[in-house]
Each structure stands twice: as structure tokens, then as C-alpha cells.
Image: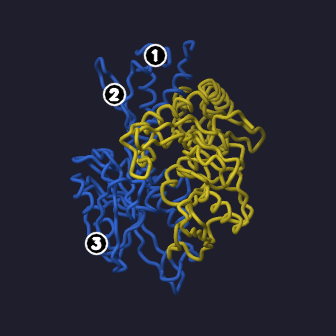
Chain colours: A yellow, B blue
Amino acid sequence: MSKMRRSERIVRLTQILLEQPHRVLSLTEMADKLSSAKSSLSEDLAIIREVMESEGLGTLETQAGAAGGVRYVPGFRKELGLQYIQQISEILGSGERILPGGFLYMSDVLGDPILLDTAGKMFAARFKESGADYVVTVETKGIPIAVAAARYLSVPMVVVRRDHKVTEGSSVSINYVSGSRRIQTMSLSRRSLPEKSKVLIVDDFMKAGGTVKALIDLMKEFQVEVVGTGIFMSTEEPQEKMISGYVSLATLREVDEQARQVEIVPGTYFNEEE
Amino acid sequence: MSKMRRSERIVRLTQILLEQPHRVLSLTEMADKLSSAKSSLSEDLAIIREVMESEGLGTLETQAGAAGGVRYVPGFRKELGLQYIQQISEILGSGERILPGGFLYMSDVLGDPILLDTAGKMFAARFKESGADYVVTVETKGIPIAVAAARYLSVPMVVVRRDHKVTEGSSVSINYVSGSRRIQTMSLSRRSLPEKSKVLIVDDFMKAGGTVKALIDLMKEFQVEVVGTGIFMSTEEPQEKMISGYVSLATLREVDEQARQVEIVPGTYFNEEE
């Protein structure tokens, strides 16, 4: 490839960095790829960092030395997060979404590519320092959010199954009592998590926290450390949860079946840093 | 915000475009956002398009006129796809992955953020002209791939459930006979797909095609049109499938339990265009 102009290099570098968040990319390899001097790349990266920081998109971390590299660490602005929760609240606030039993239909929200991506970015920004090696969720509705969070954290995503599957090999299973007082099972392939890993638990919805607590118990069986819990939406009631320290994007305050009203407010994500 | 320099605008524009594939973005709005003249933006976009096309990342489509806009259409190079299948083949080719019954453990591949993202890009590039309004999959293992494909096609993703859930509202259910000759159920919320939509079906694995055929039958109940079927991996045997015209990234030619060998070759994705 012939030598690129600065503006061309910047397109390519921006693309390479955005596509691989949290990966340390070697300056030497990038210089080869773009047929450019490392000194030019450093100037380009300074420009990219400046824009990313001023736009609240995150930052670039550079490592000096022979093994010098650069890493894009996605960030997220709190005010954009509040706009996002406002948007979620408007979408879900429509009375038409209330299902018999006071459940809320939100599968379409969890299937929307932009809404999902934003949730993933928010969790990745919040847990960027957690050291998580894996994002863990339980099937089914938590999976899309776990995929989005894992993408922006650049770690693998692991799905706990509701029952043991032949395609998972030998598994560890636990039983637990769900919010509806039924005995349920969770099962995870032995191969999926190496001992001493750090995991971030992600799920779509949490009421009392029985499912998340069971996930935490299952993680103990694998001798891995839970470094955080990210929930898309938690309910305000019961206030006493079975777990502590979770981070929720939104809080479901009320579903009034009679009046067909739903109230959603920003979650613990927006509390002052503990 | 003060006026941006060209290189700064290019970082921002590249980021905005990459984050929202297939969306028509208004030039007027972008000019406002970046405090720049539309004529400068047009020059920037020409540079971005040139790099994207020369790198095989896709293209930019511009629409002239008062409602002028620009749209990033992701592309994917066939030779990169072949490298990808080679990589998948090496990862999955290890004999340690063969499970009792000749099943292949591949949950970690479907959980890897880069491998997943690449599969999504490949499907999005292949089906970019399909007009799909939705990506549809069935739980569980197809979901991550469906999320990735839907992200790059910028359409919502819909998950068909294995049984009827209270959180889905009124649903349409069908029964079908699976490859293992068991009667299975699929269920999809009535709200999830408007009539006359176009859907792309995505799944992780296909043997004879019974599950995909059932998905296609379910789609008929919703009066939507199936415009394509994308499979991560299909098996070579049986050669006679229950569906036709599917696009698979990889073909599983053989799992030899005795010799602990697995053979994976490029799928129908790489056939000459029909």
C-alpha cells in the first residue's frame, strides 16, 4: 500500500481503535499496516485522543517503550446516560406494554440495536476498571445486553443455561428458589470459566435478586471472583434485595395495572460514586 | 463548540458513521453538530469513503438534495472471510472439543467478542441488499450471532422462545419435530413482528434444517417474508436439507470421535454468487 495522508490514516486508525476496545494495539504493527512512521502515528493518535476526550467517547491510553502500544478505553457521559433512561422511560412508559400480572413487555427494547449498544457502552464504561475477564449472564433475555457489554469491554461472554445440554460437555448445576417460589436449575459448562477468573454478571431484569444471587453462588463453584453486577432494570420493590452493590441503569418504580401507568427512573448507575 | 479542524472532524465523522451502520444521517444535522460547513463535510466524507472502499470496510452512500444524507454500508472482503474460517477451523479443530455423541463444544467461540463481531459483519455484508427489517433467531445459542448481525444491519433482533413466557404477552406457538425426533415447541410474541415485514433468520448451527424450517413456518403465521437465512455452521451431512438457499459461514465436514479429528471448511457463503 502506498503511503497514506494524515486524514486517511486518521480514518483508518479511528476505525481500528473503535473496533477493538480495550485491546492493546502495537504501534509497530500499526505503522507497518499503514506504511507510516511511528512519529506520524503518535501525532495522529494525539488528535484522536483529544476528540474522544472532548466528546466523552472515552480515551486512548498509550504505553511507551519498545513494546509501545495504544488502547482505546470507551467512556460514557452521565448526561447522555440520563437522556437514554429518559428515552427508555418514554418507550416503556406506554400503558399498552403492561401485561397481565403487572409484567412489562420489553423484549423489543432489548432487541433494538442502538438501545442495546448504548447499554453495553454504559456498563463497559462503569466497569472498565473492574478487571473483569468475562461477562456472565443467564439465558435468555440477559444475553443481548451481555453481548453488548462484552463487546465494549472486549472480553468473552458466557451464558449460564437453564438446564444441562449435550453441546456443553460436563457441567456444574445448582438449584435455587426463584422469586415465584419455584425450584429452578442453572447449569454451566466446566470448560467455560477458568479458576481465579474475574467475572462481571449482567442481566436484564432484577426484582428481589434471587437469580443474580444464584449466579453468584454458581460462580463460587467455579472459584471465580464476581467483580460487579450490572442490571438493565431493577424494581424499586422489594427495597431489601438478596444482593448488594449492583449497578442498574433504570429503576422500575411502579407498574399500575389499573391506571395503565408505568414509572421508570434512573437506576443506581447514576448515584454518586460510592 | 468551536470550529473543528479537518482531522478532528474526520475522527468524529468516522466514529458517528461506524456506530450507526445503514442509518441515513442528515448532513445538515452533522454540520450543526460539528459546527462546520456542509461543503467541508462533503470533502471529509469523500476521504472517509475512499479509505473504507480501499480497505474493504464498506462504502458511504450519499443522497443529494435538501434532505441530503449519508449512510455507511458495511462491507466485508472475501479473503478476510476465508482467513476467519481458517481461524475458526483451527480453534474448533482441536480434538479436545469433541463431546460424547460427536457433538462439538463451541460455546466459547460464540462468546468471543471479536469472532462474534466478525460473523455479524459477514452476514450484514451478505444480506445488505435483502431489505430485512428484522433479524430473527431462536433461543439460545443463536442469540449472540443474531445480535452481531442485527448491529451491523442496524435492524432490531427478535428472539423466538422455546416456550410461552408471561413477559411476552399473547404469543403464537407451533410444534415441530426436531432432528432428534422429539416434538418441540416454538413461541413468539404477537407484538414482536408487524405483518408484511421482511426478516433474516440467523442461527448458530444447522444439521438437517428442522429448526430453521420450523422458524420459517412460524414466520408464515406472522405473514412476514423470509428474505434470507444465515447459519454460522452447517453440517455437510445430510446433504439433503429441509430448507434451501441458506448461507453458512462454515461447513462441518466431519467429527471423528475415534480419531479425535474435526474437519471444518468454508461454507456456502463462499460459493460463487448464484
Q: CA distance from mark 2 to mark 1?
A: 18 Å
Q: CA distance from mark 3 to mark 2?
A: 41 Å
Q: Which residue is mark 1?
A: B32
Foreground residue among B271 and B101: B101
Residue B208 on image: x %, y %: 32, 73
- The 10 Å Cα crowd at callout 2, few under 14, some 14 to 19, many 20 or more, is some
Q: Is residue A72 visible?
A: no
Name the amino acid, label 2. Answer: Thr
At x 52% / y 49%, what residue is drawn? A145
Determine if marks 1 and 3 fall on one subunit: yes
Name the amino acid, label 1. Answer: Asp
Q: Which element type, helix, strand or loop, lies under badge 3? A: loop
Q: Which residue is mark 3?
A: B241
Q: Disc 3 sits on a residue from what chain?
A: B
Name the amino acid, label 3. Answer: Lys
Circle nearer the viewer, 2 or 1: 1
Q: Which element type, helix, strand or loop, lies under badge 1? A: helix
Circle nearer the viewer, 3 or 2: 3
From this view, report whether residue B10 is shown above or below residue B85: above
Foreground residue among A94 and A48: A94
Of the numbered discs 2 and 1, the one sitting upstream in the chain is 1
Residue A58 on image: x %, y %: 63, 33
Quarter occupied by residue B45: top left
Q: Disc 2 sits on a residue from what chain?
A: B
